[in-house]
Image (cartoon, rainbow, N blue to C red):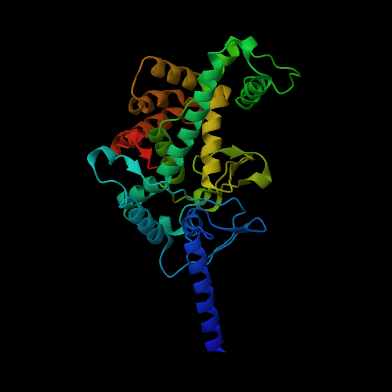
């Protein structure tokens, strides 16, 4: 029986090797995006379990190697392939994890855990800013056109975008695009400095150790009052009914956090200051320390929250990462 199983395994390996050589199987693609089946994540011994997927979260058996050590090794192996010249030192490998390693919280050396946490989140944060920048570029092209010359498709895209960024009330039957609307839209469709996002996520998750981040991919402590959408805090105040919003993957948490800052009326001053910094030509790595002051509504103890975020940015030199980019 064992001989038959061995022969079958060899046969499958030969078939995969043959089809890969002919281009039928994209091994690199398998490593980048785990396969799916019936909308759930499928494990494979040769596919890292940390990468993004679009199925539901499923418990996965641990390997003999710790998750953190495994993914750290993979990041380092890919980073070593990048061009070592000084002008490329700020390039990072485009590796996108869908959840944090469960044993990240077991790393006792705080500085070591901080470094890993930053390494894991950087590609996700940079990619999201790239997507926002691309949308902003498309918006700027349309803004330069006379409104009456916009096509139906262009008008519909602008209306849809304005609705998403909460410029229009959803109850308005036929929203009308004006120059004022476009100006406000450009004010909202903009990036969040990577350093600021890293600082806030590190504070909210304890550098990736909180159960909200491990069990619910919650990086920024967003609240919800829908019981089926969140994780209940163990020490919730008497009478409080909120939970911490959970997400199917880390990218969704980043998207929700960014959208909140870019659309909520609570952060109008945040967007105004960001716009002023951009117009004045201030480098992006100087934005975070200025924008922190406009996050008074992010915490019930705003004074402590703002001073803590500032300290995290400064002590960990997080503004260095505002100039990082993804390797092609």
Of residues 157 and 225, the one nearer the viewer is 157
Image spot of residue 130 (x, y percent): 46, 34
Residue at x-position 65% and y-position 25%: 160
Question: Would residue 186 be seen by someone viewing this image from the given angle?
Answer: no
Of residues 15 and 132, the one nearer the viewer is 15
Question: Would residue 134 be seen by someone viewing this image from the given angle?
Answer: yes
Q: Quadrant location of residue 156?
A: top right
Locate the C terminus and report the quarter of the image it occupies.
top left
Residue at x-position 30% and y-position 49%: 111
Locate the N terminus and report the quarter of the image it occupies.
bottom right
Q: How many marks?
A: 0
**In the image, farthest residue toward the front:** 22
Question: Relative to 34, does residue 185 appear above or below in the rendering?
Answer: above
Image spot of residue 114 (x, y percent): 35, 47
Residue at x-position 33% and y-position 50%: 79
**In the image, farthest residue toward the left:** 86
Q: State left or right for residue 241 relative to residue 125.
A: right
Q: Quadrant location of residue 143?
A: top right
Of residues 169 and 37, the one nearer the viewer is 37
Image spot of residue 236 (x, y percent): 57, 44
Image spot of residue 279 (x, y percent): 40, 15
Question: Relative to 203, does residue 269 appear above or below in the rendering?
Answer: above
């Amino acid at each position: 029986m064992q001989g038959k199983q061995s022969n079958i395994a060899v046969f499958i390996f030969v078939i995969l090797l043959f089809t890969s050589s002919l281009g039928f199987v994209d091994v690199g693609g398998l490593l980048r995006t785990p396969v799916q089946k019936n909308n759930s994540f499928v494990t494979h011994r040769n596919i890292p379990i940390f990468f993004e997927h679009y199925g539901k979260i499923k418990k996965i058996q641990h390997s003999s190697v710790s998750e953190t050590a495994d993914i750290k090794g993979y990041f380092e192996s890919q980073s070593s392939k990048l061009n070592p010249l000084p002008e490329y030192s700020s390039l990072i490998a485009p590796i996108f994890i869908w959840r944090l390693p469960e044993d990240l919280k077991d790393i006792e050396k705080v500085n070591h855990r901080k470094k890993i946490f930053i390494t894991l989140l950087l590609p996700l944060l940079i990619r999201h800013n790239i997507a926002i920048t691309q949308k902003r570029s498309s918006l700027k092209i349309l803004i330069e056109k006379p409104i009456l010359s916009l096509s139906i498709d262009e008008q519909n895209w602008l209306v849809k975008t304005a609705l998403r960024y909460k410029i229009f009330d959803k109850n308005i039957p036929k929203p009308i695009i004006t120059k004022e609307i476009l100006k406000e839209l450009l004010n909202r469709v903009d990036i969040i400095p990577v350093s600021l996002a890293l600082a806030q996520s590190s504070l909210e998750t304890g550098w990736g150790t909180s159960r909200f981040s491990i069990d619910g991919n919650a990086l920024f402590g967003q609240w919800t009052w829908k019981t089926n959408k969140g994780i209940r805090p163990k020490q919730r105040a008497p009478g409080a009914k909120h939970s911490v919003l959970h997400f199917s993957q880390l990218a969704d948490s980043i998207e929700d956090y960014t959208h909140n800052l870019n659309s909520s009326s609570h952060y109008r001053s945040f967007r105004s200051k960001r716009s002023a910094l951009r117009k004045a030509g201030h480098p992006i790595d100087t934005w975070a320390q200025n924008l922190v002051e406009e996050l008074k509504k992010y915490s019930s103890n705003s004074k402590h929250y703002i001073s803590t975020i500032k300290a995290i940015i400064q002590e960990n030199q997080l503004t260095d990462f505002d100039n990082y980019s993804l390797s092609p």
